[in-house]
Amino acid sequence: MSRNGRSPGRAPGLLERNGFRPVVTNNRPAVDLAAAEQAAGLLLNALGLDLADENLAETPRRMAHALIEMTNGPNFELTTFPNDEGYDELVLVQNIAMQSVCEHHMLPFVGVAHVGYLPGSRILGLSKFARMVELHARRPQTQERLTKRIADHLQAELDPKGVGVVIEAEHTCMSLRGARNPRARTTTSAMFGRLRDEPRSRAEFLALTRSQR
Ligand SMILES: Nc1nc2c(ncn2[C@@H]2O[C@H](COP(=O)(O)OP(=O)(O)OP(=O)(O)O)[C@@H](O)[C@H]2O)c(=O)[nH]1
Ligand SMILES: [Zn+2]
């Protein structure tokens, strides 16, 4: 791979021919707003839209801003507290609103996340479950990877006795186009520790999250 993450020798595409150059930091492309606006304009042109029309003149800028907003989750301080009471039952935050972008079509997938854990020596500030979902959701990806990333992050930060994440989502690439199945919902889960291996804890977690469906 070259420094900009592309395979060497690839023929220059439309964007390169029009002067688009991705900005790269630490081998990861960073957001380049000007290039994104230019690219959005090129795409709209290619789709046959007339950007000279006053109604569309600002659309490339809006499109670039919207896509950047939808694919960059805000970082946050992960506040934890000592588990002084030795609380060792399930903590479960359900129905966390989740919106992400499918990396195959760059179309949204939208739904809810249920995130739970069995505490070890630290407990997590409750709002941080929603912030963690947002941090990981706002990027192009698959639902499977998103589910696993949230679980991995909690596992790494809290060293808990167990972690469980369930996500249910509608993929607009499947509901609004292509297969056009507006009622289809995809459920994914990732579990670690006792929530994966101990039947009682696993059953409780799955029963509680299932009651929301
Ligand atoms: N496993 C998984 N697949 C996804 C996700 N989001 C989108 N996809 C699928 O990615 C696949 C891409 O397949 P392609 O056949 O290359 O795409 P396509 O020609 O647009 O296919 P159709 O969507 O069937 O019209 C599709 O089956 C999508 O449904 C996801 O989060 N997880
Ligand atoms: Zn898709």
Image (cartoon, rainbow, N blue to C red):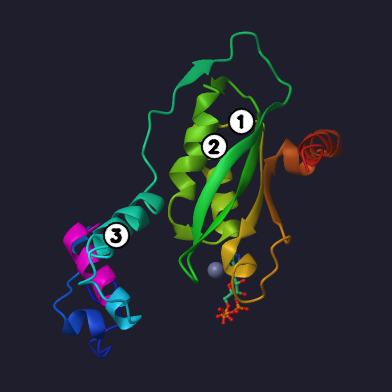
Q: Quadrant of the N terminus?
A: bottom left
Residue visible at 47% across and 47% down in the picture: 136
- Circle 2 sits on which residue? 154
Q: Magenta stretch: residue 203 in it? A: no
- SS for callout 2: helix
Q: Is residue 184 left or right of residue 124?
A: right
* Front-most of residues 120 and 37: 37
Q: Horizontal and vertical percent for residue 78?
A: 43, 28
User: Residues in magenta?
Assistant: 27-42
The kind of residue on which mark 3 rests is: Ala
- Circle 1 sits on which residue? 160
Q: Magenta stretch: residue 38 in it? A: yes
- Quadrant hosting residue 67: bottom left
The kind of residue on which mark 2 rests is: Leu
* Front-most of residues 25 and 37: 37
Q: Horizontal and vertical percent for residue 73?
A: 39, 45
- SS for callout 1: loop
The kind of residue on which mark 1 rests is: Pro
- Quadrant hosting residue 129: top right
- Circle 3 sits on which residue? 64
User: Mark 1 and mark 2 in contact (Cβ < 8 Å)?
Assistant: yes
Q: Horizontal and vertical percent for residue 95?
A: 65, 36
Q: Is residue 171 left or right of residue 104?
A: right
Q: Horizontal and vertical percent for residue 201?
A: 80, 33
Q: Is residue 124 left or right of residue 184?
A: left
